[in-house]
Image: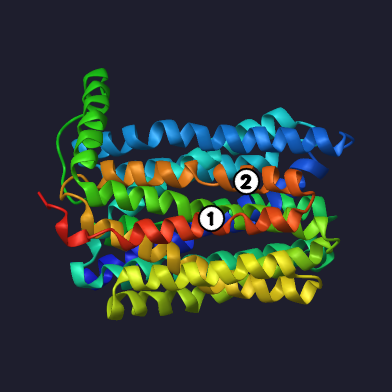
Amino acid sequence: MSLRRRKWGWAMYDWANSAFATTVMAGFFPVFFKQYWNAGVPVTESTFRLGLTNSLASLLIVVMAPLLGAIGDYLGRRKRMLLGFAFLGLLMTGGLYLVDEGEWRLAAGVYVLAVFGFSGSNVFYDSLLPFVSSRDDLDRTSALGFSLGYLGGGMLLGLNVLMTLKPQWFGLADAALAVRLSFVIVAVWWLVFSVPLMVLVPEPENHPHGVTPRVLGIGFRRIGDTLREIRQLRHVWLFLVAYWLYIDGVDTIVRMAVDYGLSLGFEQKSLILALLITQFTGFPAALLFGWIGSRFGPRAGIFLALLVYTVVTLGGALMEAVEDFYLLAFAIGMAQGGIQALSRSFYARMIPEGKTAEFFGFYNMLGKFAAILGPLMIGLVGAMTGSPRAGILSLLVLFVAGAVLLARVKPDDCHRH
C-alpha cells in the first residue's frame, strides 16, 4: 500500500475524533453539564463539579498513558489499541444522550470514560506518525492531520450549533434535545470516519502476545526503561520540558478564553462564534505551518507560533470590545494547529525506532499535565494585583521559558536505535 494512502487514512482519524474535542469537550458538555445535568444547582457548586470531572479525566490518562504506550509497543498492536480506545470513547459519547436531567454523577462518569477513550486513542494515533510518513515529510503529514481535524470538527460543530439555535428546522422539540442528539451524531461521525484508518493503515508489527498480568508487568518495567533512556537522551527531555511549558500556556488560553470572555461581559453566542472562527482559521493555518516546517524546519515554525501567542497574550490583557475577542480567536486559530503539529513532528524525529508508543505516552502525559501552571499563575497574579489582566500577562513567562529551552534542543544529537 502506498505511503500516500497510509498518510491520508491516518490523517482522517483526526477528522473523526476532533468532533469530540470541539462539539463535546469545548462546546456543549461544559454548558449542558451546568444547565441540564446540574439544573437548579448554585453556579459555584456546578463549576466545582465540572472542574472535578475534568481533573479526574485528565488524571486518569496522565497515570495510564505511559503504561498504555509501553504495552502497545511490546504487543505491536498500536492500531488495534487505538481503535479499542476510540470505540470506548464514541460509545460513551453516544451514551450521554441517555443521561436524564439532574443526573450529574452519571453524566460525569460517562464523560470521564469518553475522555479516557479519546485521549488513550491519541497516544497510539500519534505513535503511528513515523510509520505513515517518510522522515522528510513528517511536518506536512502531522499538519495534515491537525488541519483536517480543524475542518471536520468545525463543520460538525457548526451544524450542531445550528441545531441548538433553530431546533424546529430539524424537527426537534427544543435546544436540549438538539444538544443530546449532537452527542449521538458525534459518536456516529467518529465511528464512520475511523474506517479509513482501519482500512488504509497497516499494523506496523505484530507479536502473538495477549494482555496478561505478565504483559502488564513488562509494561511497567518498560516505563522505567523509557524514563532512564529519556534521561540519557538529553535533547529529548530538554524538548519535553520546553514543550510542557509552552503547551501549558497554549492550553491555558484555550481553557480560560471562554471564562475570561464571560467575565468581560461578552455574550455566550459571541464566544461560540469565536470558537468557530478559531476552528476554520486552524484548517489552512495548520497546512501553512506544515509547509513552514518542511521548508525552514519545525523549530522555526514553533518559534513563529510562540511569537503569535505572545501577541495574543498582550492583546488579551488590553482588549475591551467583543471585536477584539474575534481578532484574538483568529490569531489563536493561526497558531494553535501549527504549534501542535510541528511539536509532534519535531518530537517524532528524536525518539528511538520501535518505541514510538512508549515515548508518545510520555509526550501525551505532559500534554495532559499542561494547563496546571497557567491557571495557577493567572489566579495568583490576579489575586495579588487585583487585576485579571495582569494575571493573563503572567502567561508570557511560560512562552518565553519554553522558547529559551527549545532553542537549546539539538534533535540531530539524539541517537536513533
Tell me the number on the disc at residue 397. 1
The answer to whether residue 35 is left or right of residue 7 is right
The residue at the far front in this view is 385
The span from disc 1 to disc 2 (Cα, nearest Å) is 10 Å
User: Which residue is situated farthest in the right direction here?
Assistant: 40
The residue type indicated by label 2 comes to Met
Looking at the image, which is closer to me, 379 or 206? Answer: 379
Determine whether the residue tagged by mark 1 lies in a helix, strand or loop: helix
N-terminal of the pair, mark 1 or mark 2, is: 2
Number of the label disc, if any, that sits on residue 197: none
In percent of the image, x 48 and y 60: which residue is there?
400
**Residue 126 in sight in this render:** yes
Q: Amino acid at mark 1?
A: Val
Residue extending farthest to the top is 213
Q: Which quadrant of the rendered structure holds the N terminus? A: bottom left
Q: Quadrant of residue 186?
A: bottom right
